[in-house]
Amino acid sequence: MILTAIAAMAKNRTIGVNGDLPWRIPEDFKFFKDKTTGHIMIMGRKTFESLGGPLPNRLHVVITRQNNYEPEGAHVFSTIGDALDFCSEQTDSGAWPEEVFIIGGGEIYKQMLDSTDRILLTEIQREFEGDTKFPEFSSEEFAEIDRSHREKPVPFDFVTYERRD
């Protein structure tokens, strides 16, 4: 199983504000859709709720401490370990592809960083106010292997980082 964190992050590491994105970048939405369609997505409860319901053609795995949380269209776990075991069963059986996406929020990214193999980060080249941040990671842990720049609607880069051996 390959664990890939996928996020859009402002220059000041902001990834969200009040359960939403503080920007609208259509090309980033398309990138997210293209990458995650047909895959398992791991997320926290608030991230799942911010989606407005399950996204089509994806398996939703939600991690929450909230008891009796049983949303339609999601598999719910109380620990990251249990969620990863479930995802591993799904990928090992061939039911879902090997790459599993971590889609947030900030605390899930942070807690799963040590297990993350790849990071797909849309780096927005300006600061935005927000209440959720992407965790710090070092170039000693992750190597940048690809960068593709865009100018509109704001300057941003699609960047791929791979965990160093």
Image: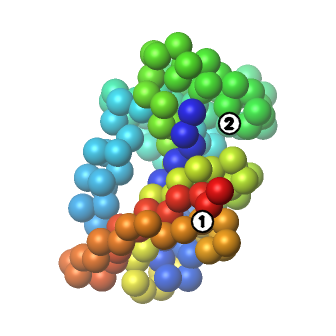
Q: Position of residue 72 (x, y in %)?
A: 51, 21
Three-letter amino acid code of the residue under disc 1:
Phe
Q: Residue at x 67, y 31 (%)?
A: 84
Q: Secondary structure at mark 1?
A: strand
| Image quadrant where residue 29 sits | bottom left
The quadrant the N terminus occupies is: top right
Mark number, residue 80: none
User: Mark 1 Cα within 10 Å, few/some/many (few <14, many 20+)?
Assistant: some
Q: Quick check: can you spot residue 36?
A: yes
Left or right of 98, for residue 106? right
In this rendering, the answer to whether 1 lies above or below 7 is: above
Q: Secondary structure at mark 2?
A: strand
Q: Amino acid at mark 2?
A: Ile
Give me the C-alpha separation between circle 1 and circle 2. 25 Å
Q: Nearer the viewer, residue 36 or 97?
A: 97
Rendered image: mark on residue 142: 1
In this rendering, is residue 116 above or below 20? Answer: above
Residue bearing mark 2: 63
Instruction: Answer left or right for 54 relative to 1.
Output: left
Residue 121 appears in the picture as rendered: no
Q: Position of residue 80 (x, y in %)?
A: 73, 37
Residue found 74% across the figure and 27% down from its top: 82
Residue density around tag 2, few if under 14, some if 14–19, many if 20 or more, within 10 Å: many
Figure quadrant of residue 149: bottom left
- Of residue 79 and residue 88, the one placed in the foreground of this image is 88
Residue under the point 48% across and 70% down? 144
Q: Is residue 36 above or below residue 121?
A: above
Q: How are the colours assigned in the image?
A: rainbow
Q: Residue at x 30, y 71 (%)?
A: 148
Q: Outermost residue toward the front?
A: 165
